Structure formats: C-alpha cells, structure tokens
Image (cartoon, coloured by chain):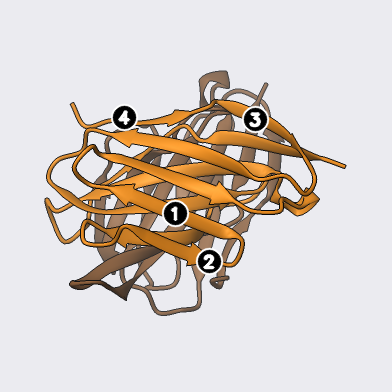
Amino acid sequence: EADIYQTPRYLVIGTGKKITLECSQTMGHDKMYWYQQDPGMELHLIHYSYGVNSTEKGDLSSESTVSRIRTEHFPLTLESARPSHTSQYLCASTAATLIAGGATYEQYFGPGTRLTVT
Amino acid sequence: KNQVEQSPQSLIILEGKNCTLQCNYTVSPFSNLRWYKQDTGRGPVSLTIMTFSENTKSNGRYTATLDADTKQSSLHITASQLSDSASYICVVSDRGSTLGRLYFGRGTQLTVWP
C-alpha cells in the first residue's frame, strides 16, 4: 500500500463555504490526480498534475481548482460549495512499473474524502 | 466511444465459494488492463495489471484473464473470504499518451456472506 494521505476523511459543510481538500504523498511521485466518484459510478478525472507548477483539467468539468507548489502536496479547493459538489473525492499519484513488454504507470490512491454539502 | 462495462453490477456469494467477475471494453488503442479492489470508504488498490500479451495473471486467490481479441477480461476469486467484500473495478489504459489515459468501469459490488 502506498503512502498517500487525504484529509479530512469526512466533511459536512453548508452551501457557500470555501473548502480545501488536502492530499499529500511521501513517495516523490511527480504525477498526481484528483478523481470524483459517486456511489455505484465510475471514477471521473477532474484534475491532474505532471509536477510542480503544472496543473491541468481532467475529463469531467469541475468548479474546483488545484495547485502544485510542492511535489508532495496537491490540494483541491472549492471556493463556494454547493449540494451538487456532494461526492467522494479521491487523490492518486503514479509511479512507473515494469510490465510485460515495457512499462506503465501504477496508480496509488488515497483513502478519499467524503464531502457532503447541505 | 471508449468504454468499460462490468457485470454483474452486484453479487452475493457465501464464504468459501468461488466467483467470476466480467469486464468488457471498447478502448482503443489498448495498453493494459487493471483490476482494482475498493473497500467501502477507501481508495482503490491494485490487484493485477495485464498487457495484451498476457492471458492470465494471479495474485493470491485472485486470477485475472484477458482476451485482447474479444476485448474481455475476467477476475476469478477462489475460496472467497469475508474480507473479499468490496467493489472490484476494471480499468483500461490506452496508449495515447505518457499519462496513460485510464477508463474506469463502474465496478462490481461483491458481498461475501458467512
């Protein structure tokens, strides 16, 4: 199991609040990701980063923003939370791993933050 | 459209029994296929990664198979245990970029009863 941490694990807040979900990893991985997952649904990529000062939007449109000032830290911020933001947010980082015929990137996931906006 | 479909959506089995989960995909080009186990309230944990040249790969009581021609994969769990209760997610990576674009299935929710 990889060393990737997320805080808080659970958060219930009111509409309009600003929140930051924390994600940190101690493995020195350059690539980090944020996914959004609703119950019974697939993970959707909302942000990713190739390294310090690099951030990109993912496939799913999200009103959140991210920053990558340090390699080990990739926080996600919602300026004004709404009930539609209620979901589970998973952070991940990747490391190269050998497979038959070459290499690929193994994704290591954090435990997730369950966000509820009332 | 690149998609990953899993079946069944949910499954209940008795402890000690075997089961097989299915994954069909339309992702192209294909790089590799992964099976993850996700316990409730936790992040997914990798079980196996297979490339197109691999037909089967085992990890303890978990055995994954891959048929790249028919674009199908299965995850077989032998002698199930209560701790196997989780969601099992099939993930396919394309060869499109260094990021290795990942396509996620919705998972099969497995419940093992004593």
Q: Which quadrant would residue B56 be assigned to in this image?
A: bottom left
Left or right for A115, reference B106: right
Q: Does dot 4 land on a helix, a strand or a loop?
A: loop
The residue that mark 1 highlights is: B64
Image marks 1 and 4: residues in contact by CB distance under 8 Å: no
Crowding around mark 3 (Cα neighbors within 10 Å: few <14, some 14 to 19, many 20+) is some
Between residue B11 and residue A41, name the one nearer to us.
B11
Q: CA distance from mark 1 to mark 4?
A: 33 Å
Q: Which quadrant would residue B6 be assigned to in this image?
A: top left
Q: CA distance from mark 2 to mark 4?
A: 36 Å
Q: CA distance from mark 3 to mark 4?
A: 32 Å
The spot of residue A34 in percent (x, y) is: 41, 48
The spot of residue B80 in percent (x, y) is: 72, 50
The residue that mark 2 highlights is: B59
Shade representing chain A: brown
Residue type at mark 3 is Leu
Residue type at mark 1 is Ala
Image marks 2 and 4: residues in contact by CB distance under 8 Å: no
